[in-house]
Amino acid sequence: MHIIENGNVAAALGVKLCRANVIAAYPITPQTPLTEKLSEYVESGEMKAEYIPVESEHSALAVCIAASSAGARSFTATSANGLLYMHEQVQWAAGARLPIVMCVVNRAVGAPWNVWNDQQDSISQRDTGWIQMYCSDHQQIIDSVIKAYWLAEKVSVPIMVCYDGYILSHTYMPFDVPDQEQVDAFLPPFKPDYALNTEEPANLNTVTLPDVRMDVKGELAHGYMEIRYLLHEEMRKTLTVALEAEKRFAEIFGRGGDPYIEPYLCDDADYIAVGLGSLTYQLRVCVDALRKEGLKVGIMGVRFYRPFPDVAIANALKGKKGVIVFEKALSYGYEGALVSDLKSALYEHLAGTGDLPMVQNFIAGIGGRDIRTEDLTQTLRAATKSRVAKEPVWIGLKL
Amino acid sequence: MCWLFCPEIVISRTIPPAINLEYCKGCGICAEECPTKAITMMDEAGFSDEDKNKE
Amino acid sequence: MQAKTTILSLPKEEFVHPGTRACTGCGLAIAYRVGLKALGKDTILVVPPSCLTVLQGLFPIASTKLPCLNVTFASTAAAATGILATLKTQGKDKIKVAAWAGDGGTSDIGLQALSGAAERGENFIYLCYDNEGYMNTGVQRSGTTPIGAITANTPFKGKLQQKKDVPAIMAAHNLSYVAACSAAYPLDLFDKIRKCVDMPGTKYIHIHIPCPPGWGYDPRYGIKIGRLAVETGYYDLYEIVNGEFKLTAASEKLLEKRKLVPVREYFRAQSRFKILTDAQISDIQNQIDAKWASYYKKNE
């Protein structure tokens, strides 16, 4: 069914269709309407779930962690400082291998206070062991939530579905809402290997030692290092499982493609602009204009940020003359996070082959600073002529 | 009393009580709380046999 | 009115294995063991970092026989909320959820989540075992450390602030049941848990826990010292049922006896109070006397 709604509603619809049954909610701009919508579904009876208005984001994820440990399909959403406040729990959920799905409606982090969009919040959680998916439009939001539950429960790794605050959360777009039957066919009920219960008691997440230790049966159990290694290993395997998810999704819903990257006019391009989220769609306007000038430019939208699809990215950028990475976040003290990961992937797979493109980094839209399409086009044009700078260049800065 | 107050749950609920010395940590609460002073704590070092209970 | 449990009527089934990692003479071990007897088999436990985490042992071996979720320090009550929500979706209304947190994890870092859960009326028992400090990490002061106590981070002057009255804070949430208990009076603890377990909303039970290394006494005197705290009128055993306050067990007996053991005996039995001056002890004695004067008056 095609409707016109905002990005937060798209996400809420996805959660409803996935039959999440424990929802923790705490307000923070610009995520708030998402969980408000879920409260409407729950209170009207449209959705059968326990809705818990917690007293903080740290508690929101605590509720999800406990609920998931006991066998529920749980959900919460947050932004910026809310995500930062729950950081301890973010790490915990990954280490505990719980298939929680959380929407992060990207917003700038304090200090100082800022409610508008950039991606520093989710990017700062890059190393925690969560899978990260980035959405460029409302269709991708609702589809990603559905795919995320299937994927998370398959690999037992929590997933952040990220989309730009205001730019996507509050704007209206047409998109298709799948039928409940289709989603039920795609996503079976949650059946964990173990859920807390009184018949077979277990003590979850207790203290582990640096080394391995014998259990009561005389067998060596995993130590902390093994447990953590398995999280990493499963995340790398997720790159393969994500292909399976995409295929299944396409079979049932009739749409899908590459789960890792979204290419636009890349085949014959000499220069590729790279971005995460809605920025990649804004770049299409620039690329269309530059193509008219005869410049062969394309766009690679990155959809999976973690696990990092290094092979897919290296293959897509192999032999290109230049790669221009636009980011709404950075690793302070060095450069953009995406560009670092990307350069590392290129080096790993293409060093010494002669196919290594030149990479440039541009930081834009920090704190919701307006990203003017004209500025993007100019930057892109200049970047195809020569290397603008070795350091990241901040577009739209008004020092 | 000793059965009730033992933090390690190593004392049986019998008369006389039996104490599992494998897990007893030697805190002495049982000896202190016994209304008939039937238990005496002894240093493990200066000891060879296992019977710590005196009627 | 249900009959008081005696040693003979206490259920025999144990829910903790011997060989825990608790200190010798640990007061928590006593309270926990009896508490679990009161809760029974159909209980899921929630435990934040604390002495109890250590008592339960190291992966892959656990000393508790009940299912238990270890959680982050601040999130105990929120985690209990999450489990309750799941049990509701599964139709498992008979399974109880019991949170066991230390005083640090309750009165300091865990207070926000506890208050939130209580306000939402989450249906679980929250038991705070109060050994009056962050004992697991080496005896640092917490919100419930009493005034004058020497701790690892109040090494010379002792704690300068009063003990935080957590039961009073919880009572302000209009809970159906708030109680103060002690490891030295395990049968009273047992009865209180059994009494409140089916009451609506969040039930809060505060348990005074003597701690040999933290308080500075020979482990064998743990129960004696726990009793002294009550017999001096310093720490009271009570329950607040739907807002109505009532002293219980040994504290209730003191109402008739009208004679309190001088609190100096309690302080002088523990090396953590060695810097308390006679003047300070005298002050505290006056406060205790005033408190009990008002108890006597209300009881008339």
Image (cartoon, coloured by chain):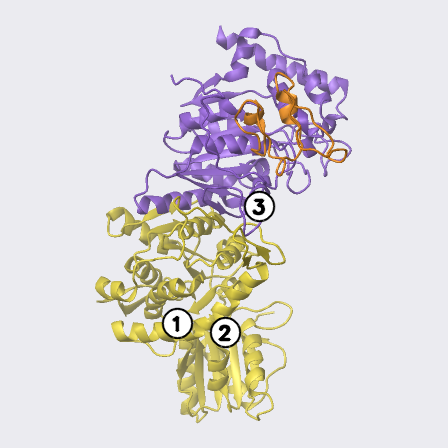
Chain colours: A yellow, B orange, C purple
- The numbered disc on residue A308 is 2
The residue mark sitting in front, 3 or 2, is 3
Q: CA distance from mark 3 to mark 1?
A: 47 Å
Question: Residue at point 67% right, 24% down?
Answer: C221
Residue B12 point in image, percent of width and height: 54, 29
Q: Mark 3 to mark 2: distance in Å?
A: 37 Å
Near mark 2 (Cα within 10 A), the count class, few <14, some 14-19 or many ≥20, is: many
Give how far across and how far down residue A304 sits, in percent.
44, 72
Q: Is residue C130 above or below residue A147?
A: above
Q: Chain of mark 3?
A: C
Task: Examine the rendered structure and indicate whether residue C256 appears above or below residue A229.
Answer: above
- Point out residue A102 in the picture as x, y percentages from the top left corner: 42, 59
As drawn, A217 above or below A323 = above
The quadrant of the image that shows the N terminus of chain A is bottom left
- From the image, tell me which residue sits under label 3: C57
Q: Secondary structure at mark 1?
A: loop
**Residue type for callout 3:** Gly
> N-terminal of the two: label 1 or label 2?
1
Q: Depth-wise, is mark 1 or mark 2 nearer the camera?
A: 2
